[in-house]
Image (cartoon, grey):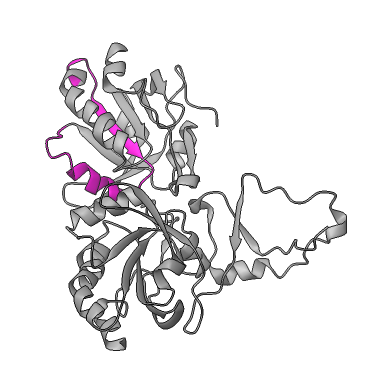
Amino acid sequence: MAPIAVGDVLPEGKLAYFDEQDQLQEVSVHSLAAGKKIILFGVPGAFTPTCSLKHVPGFIEKAEELKSKGVAEIVCVSVNDPFVMKAWAKTYPDNKNVKFVADGSATYTHALGLELDLQEKGLGTRSRRFALLVDDLKVKAANIEGGGEFTVSSADDILKDL
Amino acid sequence: MAASLSISRLILSSPTQISTTAATAKSFLSFVPLKPNRLSKPLKTTTRKFSTISATISVGDKLPEATLSYFDSEGELQTTTISSLTSGKKSILFAVPGAFTPTCSQKHLPGFVEKSAELKSKGVDTIACISVNDAFVMRAWKENLGIGDDGVLLLSDGNGDFTKAIGCELDLSDKPIGLGVRSRRYALLAEDGVVKVLNLEEGGAFTSSGAEDMLKAL
């Protein structure tokens, strides 16, 4: 699959998460994104340094500003299971806006064409770091890193596209 | 040309593609192997990793060598091997299907942490918890449960290599939950790397693989 690009339609897929009642839920990407402006950003791994200390906090900090510019949902996806995503989300107690969802088998990551092979590091297939701005399922901005670097995919970068 | 083209390795390019238990995998071996003189060059294994299809480990077996990883107290990524964990020692290795999952977090691991001193007083040198999770997640789990550095080691079998080598995979890929291939729950006692006691659960059940059960076996 070629990596997702500006002008593409965001592919459909299912992502998992635990709701506030600790029930496992599955969300369809299209139902989350249709008719709205959303930001979907991906990280190589929950609990890894850049993801935890820079990428995610950046979006949590800028969430209000992003929302004031019309973004309805800010979703963080990683190839981790939903138990791990839930535990990771809990380490950000002040977070009110960023949703943490699991792409445990990397199915959605494959659909986006954004796989990152980290088998050598004992991490298996993960996602490249990225941030997408999607408006009614159409990709308006696709800030995709080569691997896990953090140069174009921050909240500040995507704010410029709004 | 070496006649070492025995088709004894499963094709693995990512953990989620494993879909057979050891029993089904063995049936793959029953077809006629390729004849060496039909090939002009050796099979390329550039992007595919092969690993031995193994029968499930049992009492009396020597544990296969493998490398596991963890973060040390200074935050440095380290690796250790099954041989260094078990050679010349009495070791308990227990495995969980997933870090941060309920039974693992609330019962299995805490049970061993609680009983670690008692187990050590009975001559156990090493107690290690193994999971098919990466080392970052194992470290976060350890911190989340407030587990110190002595007692139980939390080790990552990130690509599931050790788990596969002992035939203890648990395929959870078809569940909507997205867990991929994990380890069956088990607890084993090894002396100088040879399995003396093996309490292996069917999947993630928790009936015989706890610390209490291990204590009784000592």
Height in image: B135 above or below A8? below
Judge whether residue A81 can be spotted in this image. Answer: no
Which residue does the image show at 57% across and 70% down from the upper left? B54
Judge whether residue A127 can be spotted in this image. Answer: yes
* Residue B116, image x, y percentages: 22, 74
Q: Is residue B183 left or right of residue A26?
A: right
Based on the picture, tell me whether residue B194 belongs to the magenta stretch: no
Range shown magenta: A67-96
Q: Is residue B105 left or right of residue A33?
A: left
Q: Quadrant of residue A14?
A: top left
Q: Is residue B182 left or right of residue B53?
A: left
* Residue A123, image x, y percentages: 43, 47
Based on the picture, tell me whether residue A82 belongs to the magenta stretch: yes
* Residue B199, image x, y percentages: 37, 80
Which residue does the image show at 19% across and 53% down from the upper left? B144
Which residue does the image show at 78% across and 67% down from the upper left? B32
Q: Nearer the viewer, residue B210 or A72?
A: B210
Q: Nearer the viewer, residue A44 or B171?
A: A44
Q: Residue furthest left?
A: A94
Q: Residue furthest right?
A: B37
Q: Is residue B74 left or right of residue A112?
A: left
Q: Nearer the viewer, residue A25 or B143?
A: B143
